[in-house]
Image: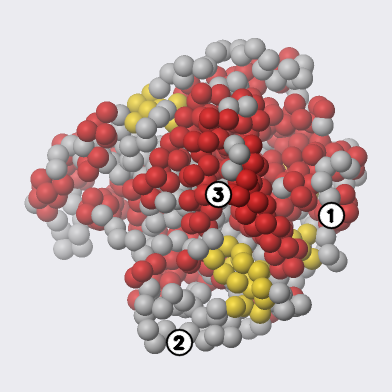
Amino acid sequence: MFIRDAKRTAKRFEKPPHTSRQKATHENKLWTGKTKTKCTFTGSPHRLILSATIMAYYYYQARKLHTLYCLLLFSSLPCFIPSMASPLPYNTKPSTPLISFLERLQSTALQTLGPKDFDPKLYVDLPLKYDLPVVESAFAKLPRSANGTVPVEDLDLFIERYLGRAGSDMVLHEPSDFVAEPDGFLPKVENSKVRTWALEVHSLWKNLSREVADAVRERPGLHTLLPLPGPVVVPGSRFREVYYWDSYWVIRGLLASKMYETAKAIVNNLISLIDVYGFVLNGSRAYYSNRSQPPLLSAMVFEIFSRTGDLDFIKKCLPSLLKEHHFWNSGIHKLTIQDSQGKKHSLSRYYAMWNKPRPESATMDKESASKLRRISAKESFYRELASAAESGWDFSSRWMRDSSDLTTLVTTSVVPVDLNAYILKMELDIAFFARITGDHSTADKFSVASQARRAAMDSIFWNNKMGQWFDYWLTDNSICEEVHMWESNNQNKKMFASNFVPVWIRPYSTDGGIVKKVIKSLRRSGLLYPAGIATSLSKTGQQWDFPNGWAPLIHMIVEGLAKSGIKEGRSMGEDIAVRWIRTNYAAYKKTGAMHEKYDVEACGEFGGGGEYVPQK
Ligand SMILES: OC[C@H]1O[C@H](O[C@H]2O[C@H](CO)[C@@H](O)[C@H](O)[C@H]2O)[C@H](O)[C@@H](O)[C@@H]1O
């Protein structure tokens, strides 16, 4: 039965602040790593989005080139104790009866089928064929042994009778603006093999385009899938729904493919989520409604506008962008840090509204939490897990006190460089959109907000000596502070690709002094490898760590360097882009697919680690 076929899916500069208190003979001299495979374009799908779109795009580019102590005496006080807080219900969204039932089914399936090739997400993606009470009643009648297992045949039969196929609530969609070879497609890509490859990747839009089935709109209560209004592009495989930050690179690819209407439809879908929830969800499933993902909606709108000049589109998007800005700059996401000069800065962090296992990974999360004894410790851990998922970096040593122990996640105690860079871009974009649509008071307000964010980033994250931006760790976990006092030791001086992401944002990419320092720092970082930029220097087995390189991070750094007016920056960006494209090409030729992550140590090797089978 289909259920059983489902795939289950340093260099250190300093310890992180919490811990201190308690790498082809590639020609470029920049590189410190050793190449295992020589990689050249010789000879003549599924995860088009992240890697593929930027590889084609970048080939083109390369060618041109967190002292008021809150003791929680009053549980309703809007303060919290990062990492050891008692659960605060006002920060937690309720689950739904459908999700709770599917989680019970998931748990029974794991007990019955065993862990081999078990993907917990599959079960929370199954649509019901009948109303929940009918399905629950049939489920309750299944024969069970004392340890909770159900005979495999009975489980299979139950699923076949009462549940639809995972993914069946999304139907294939033929994008109306797709043509096999669009006019003006990657005009600067002349190499015939690369051009053929780019067109093959371009053709994958047809495999990844979907629309929500009528059944979901007719009976939404039977589905965890959310009824988005327009056509979508999905990552593919186990990711059968729309993802927030993935959509930025989907849109970059669609724009390269001249598919402007499809790109706009994706933004409209995300806006529909803001209309209902007040923010863009991690993905278009009910079980993702407790968190967002890296906020790149304004960046999507900006890219579409710069290709289409569609002012009506901007007018439609602007009110939603204002709501999203409020989400990231209020409540649990907002914090205040006082710098060494006594100036207070507002910054943002990831903080999921959830203190239970993530439904899509509930069996795994419960297993990970089993070593924790206290319920409050488990609940805090669950919140840190979901918050790491909100960051898009699920999981990484970046959020861990002890990189070998997932239960030491302290995501909500980290003030992240990249998140604040995205919000700075959001503020700049909103100011620009408001200005061109004649809303000068909003434009002025957001211009001031962007200046304040830049000042905050300069004071809290930027390390002039090291030439990069470091995440800031909130260290005093025994209290809830209204204002956190900045300490230089609280910058996490470990190397992560995210330390260089701000160079993607205009005020930094156009600042020659900053870019020169960043170039020098990136060269010395130990992150540059023959096949790209390593996510970190720690080999933890987590997917957002060494030796994986991820397209979004590489794209942002390369684009920032390429946009800089500095010759050395452009040449470094081009060199990284070429290495990345080579490894994407070599792996594509070897495996016939684009991959979400690559092993940066060797050309043509895809990445691994994490909680699911590497995504193609
Ligand atoms: O099922 C586990 C997790 O899967 C998602 O995260 C990963 O895939 C996303 C889709 O491509 C990507 O946006 C994210 O960066 C990856 O880490 C999901 O977003 C998580 O919430 C989920 O727990």
Residue 87 point in image, percent of width and height:
38, 74
Residue type pointed to by label 3: Pro
- Calculate the distance from the C-alpha at mark 2 to the C-alpha at mark 1: 42 Å
Q: Earlier in the sequence, mark 2 or mark 1?
A: 2
Residue type pointed to by label 2: Leu
Q: Is mark 1 within 8 Å of ligand 1?
A: no
Q: Earlier in the sequence, mark 2 or mark 3?
A: 2
Residue 326 point in image, percent of width and height:
50, 56
Q: Secondary structure at mark 1?
A: helix
Q: Which residue is mark 2?
A: 71
Residue at the location (44% across, 31% down)? Answer: 232
Vertical side of 310 occupied by 324: above or below:
below
Is the residue marked by circle 1 packed among few (<14), some (14-19), or many (20+) residues within 10 Å?
A: some
Q: Nearer the viewer, residue 516 or 29?
A: 516
Q: Which residue is mark 3?
A: 295
Q: Secondary structure at mark 3?
A: loop
Q: Earlier in the sequence, mark 1 or mark 3?
A: 3
Vertical side of 307 occupied by 391: above or below:
below
Residue 248's image quarter? Answer: top right
Residue 359's image quarter? Answer: bottom left
Q: Secondary structure at mark 2?
A: loop
Residue 96 appears in the rendering: yes
Residue type pointed to by label 1: Ile
With 120 as the anchor, is 399 left or right in this view?
right
Residue at the location (55% across, 22% down)? Answer: 259
- Calculate the distance from the C-alpha at mark 2 to the C-alpha at mark 3: 32 Å
Q: Which residue is mark 1?
A: 514
- Calculate the distance from the C-alpha at mark 1 to the C-alpha at mark 3: 24 Å
Q: How is the structure coloured here?
A: secondary structure
Residue 542 appears in the rendering: no
Is the residue marked by circle 2 packed among few (<14), some (14-19), or many (20+) residues within 10 Å?
A: some
